Image: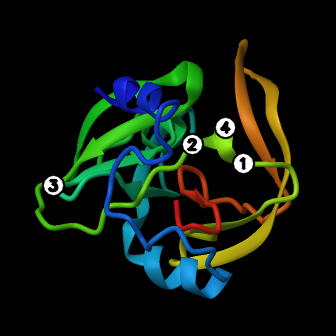
Amino acid sequence: DMQKQIDGAKKSTIISGNPVNSGDYLSPSQVYANNVDSVVAISSTIQTTSFYGTSQGTATGSGFILTQDGYIITNCHVVEGTEYPATIVGTYATNDIAVLKVDAADLPAATIGSSDSLNIGDMVVAIGNPLGTLTATQTVGYVSGKDRDISTDGSVISMIQTDAAINSGNSGGPLFNMYGE
């Protein structure tokens, strides 16, 4: 279903969520105010066993609400091998994406835009959970490149390059254009 929505983005710039505005260009503070409630912090406890015994740590990441009934998008590596008080609906490791589902209603879904409509030099906003403790942090930057083929774990993923600060814990979080998509 998510792939159908992504494919539909080629025909339309909005996949899901409620329109943020009438198509007006927003300031970074307006993008933040309109979208901060659609961004979620994800944390999990990780337990590892070695020759020296069992140790426990915390992993953090970010995500965003795709639908009002609780579907959340994040990176596959954020949820890989961990448990959350959410259901992992699906993962696609090749493109490092995962879909979670929480039992909730009337959540503030983000509006999905099309990366095809981005241009190098466009201003963008990242909202996330850097370092696992700085929830709802915004950074602002510009699109530095498009269709950047990055090889990771033997797979090539096409990415958007930005100079907006993306710190540890921001994985899975959204990058918004200045229309709040």
Q: Which residue is mark 4?
A: 116
Q: Residue at x 48, y 40 (%)?
A: 48
Residue 123's image quarter?
Answer: bottom right
Instruction: Count the marks.
Output: 4
Look at the numbered disc 4 and give the secondary structure of its residue. Answer: helix
Q: Which residue is mark 1?
A: 118
Along the viewing direction, whichever of 85 and 116 lies nearer the viewer: 116
Describe residue 137's horizontal placement relative to residue 124 as left or right: left
Q: Earlier in the sequence, mark 3 or mark 2?
A: 3
User: Looking at the picture, which amino acid does disc 1 mark?
Assistant: Leu
User: Looking at the picture, which amino acid does disc 2 mark?
Assistant: Ser
Q: Which residue is mark 3?
A: 69
User: Looking at the picture, which amino acid does disc 3 mark?
Assistant: Asp
Q: Give the x, y percent position of residue 99.
A: 34, 38
Residue 114, label in figure:
2
Q: Residues within 10 Å of mark 4 (few under 14, many from 20)?
A: few
> Alpha-carbon distance for marks 3 and 2?
22 Å
Q: Give the x, y percent position of residue 70.
A: 21, 54
Tell me whether circle 4 and circle 3 mark residues in contact (CB < 8 Å): no
Residue 85's image quarter?
Answer: bottom left
